[in-house]
Amino acid sequence: QQVAVITVDGPSGSGKGTICQLLARELGWHLLDSGALYRLTALAARHHGVELDDVEALEVLAAHLDVQFKAADSGHDIQIILEGEEVTHAIRNERVGEEASVIAALGPVREALLARQRDFACAPGLVADGRDMGTVVFPSAGLKIYLDASAEERAQRRYKQLISKEPGASLDDILNDIKARDARDMNRAIAPLKPASDAVRLDTTTMSIDAVLQAVLDEARHRG
Ligand code: C5P
């Protein structure tokens, strides 16, 4: 029997991460943060001194990623352990995101991460967050959502998250990074970021997090 899957795809800063966490909590389902796997591969490459154009070595790293996702003691957050080292926060910085997007354009790396992503689909269900969840990884998901927002709004959201941690952060730099990452993710030859033909598309530019969550839950209930 097939496990229920909801896929949520979209560009950086569209609110996918937050919505997927809330959705998984609300439904009591598992969560796949597929971007974390690309980020972990990028970080592992740095730890092992592997260059970002060494496709063979990157493929081996991706296939053998030694990673654990642990429920943290405090509440619902997940701790991420790579090769015995806690990297929960280390994988979130902009540089790792940029490197992840470079190696995510490599077919053999994507292929190596495919089975690992599908293994997350366990009862009672899975919420899958990424770029190609509905198009490639879970093409027969019962509900596919594509979240979008203007690049300016996404840059604002990222800026608000960053400014407390990095007082020197610049909105212009963030906007440029977002546009560069969009271009790379949407124009790559393999599994480019695009809505699945049967995805429900939501433009979240002027929506609150709660409004987006309710809209997705309505769709999920609607489909039983
Ligand atoms: O979502 P997040 O910012 O963590 O993803 C980092 C990068 O990993 C993205 O910019 C994208 O290039 C890549 N990615 C991907 N396919 C996914 C998830 C992430 O190509 N399913």
Image (cartoon, helix red, strand yellow):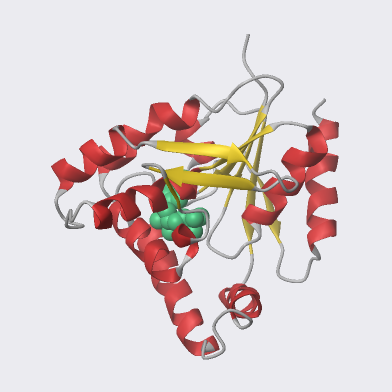
Q: Nearer the viewer, residue 203 or 47?
A: 47
Q: Nearer the viewer, residue 39 or 217?
A: 39
Rendered view: 175 above or below 189: below
* Snapshot quadrant of residue 10: bottom right
> Residue visible at 50% across and 89% down?
172
Q: Is residue 104 left or right of residue 217?
A: left
Q: Is residue 29 left or right of residue 138?
A: right
> Residue visible at 80% across and 51% down?
213
Q: Quadrant of the N terminus?
A: top right
Q: Quadrant of the C terminus?
A: top right
* Snapshot quadrant of residue 61: top left
Residue 16 location (% of width, % of height): 63, 54
> Residue visible at 21% across and 51% down?
48
Q: Nearer the viewer, residue 104 or 88?
A: 88
Q: Nearer the viewer, residue 59 or 183?
A: 59
> From this viewpoint, is residue 192 visible?
no
Residue 125 location (% of width, % of height): 68, 26
Q: Residue furthest top?
A: 1
